[in-house]
Image (spheres, grey):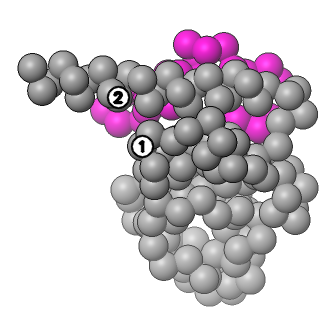
Amino acid sequence: MSLLTLRVNGATHEADVDPATPLLYVLRNDLGLRGPRFGCGLAQCGTCTVLVDGAAIRSCVVPAAQISGEITTLEGLAKNGELDPLQQAWIDEQVPQCGYCHNGQIMNARALLDRNPNPTDAEIRQGMEGALCRCMTYYRVQAAIKRVVREAQARAEASAE
């Protein structure tokens, strides 16, 4: 066992775990976060996705001891009681069905929009590859991402006036 210090959602946490323990297990079991989920355990489905310094990673296969940056989970996207625009768009576009994949979908979308705030449809599809949805809500996911882009553009235009 080893005492690890992790910066998660803006707070510093310590966990006494085997350094080879996947980050997902530390987040869920030691820190009590429920956003990232166990799906396949092979980094193939995306349900375990978190952001590390803004990059989407599959937390089910990355040992917690290898993480040195700021970790953001689904719980960390909301600020001051306000949902992240993506979380709100998920509601507005009625994306969820079973809901199992949405952690991975939203976290991948956040990483995509942080890299490219105005992606084309093809860039959205490419950026969301590997975030699997058993209910096939891909068109609604794309609509939610496009809604966030439109709303950001509208806010920018309004503030420019």
Can you tell which mark lies on residue 10? none
Q: Which residue occupies the foreground of this view, 3 or 78?
A: 78
Q: Position of residue 78 (x, y in %)?
A: 42, 35
The part of the chain drawn in magenta is: 76-102
Q: Is residue 79 magenta?
A: yes
Residue named by callout 2: 152
Q: Is residue 26 left or right of residue 161?
A: right
Q: Position of residue 32 (x, y in %)?
A: 62, 50
Give the residue displayed 47% in from the left and 60% down from the top: 54
The residue tagged with tag 2: helix, strand or loop? helix
Q: Quadrant of the C terminus?
A: top left
Q: How many marks?
A: 2
Magenta part mainly helix, strand or loop?
loop
Give the residue displayed 48% in from the left and 79% down from the top: 68
Give the residue displayed 77% in from the left and 71% down from the top: 61
Q: Which residue occupies the foreground of this view, 133 or 62?
A: 133
Residue named by callout 1: 117
Q: Is residue 85 left or right of residue 138?
A: left
Q: Is residue 121 left or right of residue 38?
A: left
Q: Quadrant of the N terminus?
A: bottom right
Q: Is residue 84 visible?
A: yes
Give yes or no for contact between labels 2 and 1 (Cβ–Cβ under 8 Å): yes
